[in-house]
Amino acid sequence: MADTKISALTAATAAALANEFAINEAGTSKKLTLQQVLDGADVLANAAALADANKLMVIQSSVAKDSPLTDLVTYLQTKGMPKVSRLNTQHDNATTTPTEIANGLEMTGLVAGTYKFQYNIIHQAGLTTTGVRFNANFSGTVSSFVYWRRFYGLIATAADANQDQTSVLAAGQVMQGWADKTKQTTEVTGVTLSTDTAASDMLTIVEGIFVATGTGDLELWHGSEVAATTSVMVGTSLTVIRTA
C-alpha cells in the first residue's frame, strides 16, 4: 500500500474512544487510542491553587489557543456572572459632606452597558445621636441611573429616620429609606438621625440599576448627619451584575 499523507486521509465523521493514533515512543513507532489519551489526562497532577496567570486552552475559529484565567472571568461577567469588591480599610468621615469610599470598594472601568448593583454596608457611629448618609455615583455618562437605600428602624407604623439594628418586635418594623433618580456625590440626600448603639455595627443597603453610555467607575460616597464621626467598616461589599 502506498504511503498517504495524513492530510489526504478521509475525515472521520466523529471521534470514537477506540480510534487509534500513531505515536513515537522513545524512537519506536507505536499506536495509541483516544481512550488512552483521555486516561493520560486524568493522571495529571491537580493545580495547587488557581492563579490569575493560569492559562486555559480554547478553540477560536478552529484554531487551538491559550487564554489567561482572568480573560475567562472578564468574559463571563459580560454574560451575567456577578463582579464583587470589598472594602479593605475603614472609611471615616466627621463632616456632613460625603467623600468617596475607595480602598477596594470602588468598581472601576465599567464599559457601556446595563448594570444592577447592591452595596451591603456595615457602618458605625461614635454617638447614638449621629446618623449617616450615602450617595451612589457613576463617573461616566449614563442615560438612566436610579437607586434607593434602605434600613430598619424600631417603629412598626411609620418611618422616622432613626436606624435600629435590633428590630425584633413581634409586629415587625417598617423598612425605611430614600430613593433617587440621579447619580450623586456630595449632594445632600436622605440622612438618618440616630443609631441604636454607639460603636456598634449597623446595616444599610444601597441598590439600583443604571445604563452606562460610556466607561466609568461605580462609586459609593459617605458622610455624617452632623460634625461627628461615622465609619464604614471593613467587609462592606459591592455586587455588580451586567445585564446587557
Image (cartoon, rainbow, N blue to C red):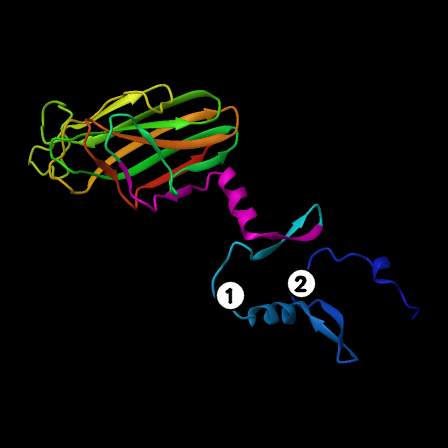
Residue 2 in the magenta stretch? The answer is no
Q: How far apart are marks 2 and 1 (CA)?
A: 29 Å
Helix, strand or loop for disc 2 = loop
User: Can the viewer see residue 244 in this picture?
Assistant: no
From which residue to which does the magenta span run?
63-92
Identify residue type, mark 1. Ala
Identify residue type, mark 2. Ala
State the image coordinates of residue 14 (x, y, percent, origin top left): 69, 57
Residue matched to label 2: 16
**Where, by quadrant of the figure, is residue 42 drawn?**
bottom right
State the image coordinates of residue 117 (x, y, percent, origin top left): 38, 33
User: Label 1: how many residues lie within 10 Å, few (<14), some (14-19) or many (20+)?
Assistant: few
* Residue beneath the point at 63% across and 69% down: 35
> Of label 2 and label 1, which has the lower sequence position?
2
Vertical order, 53 against 35 (above or below): above
* Residue beneath the point at 28% across and 20% down: 188
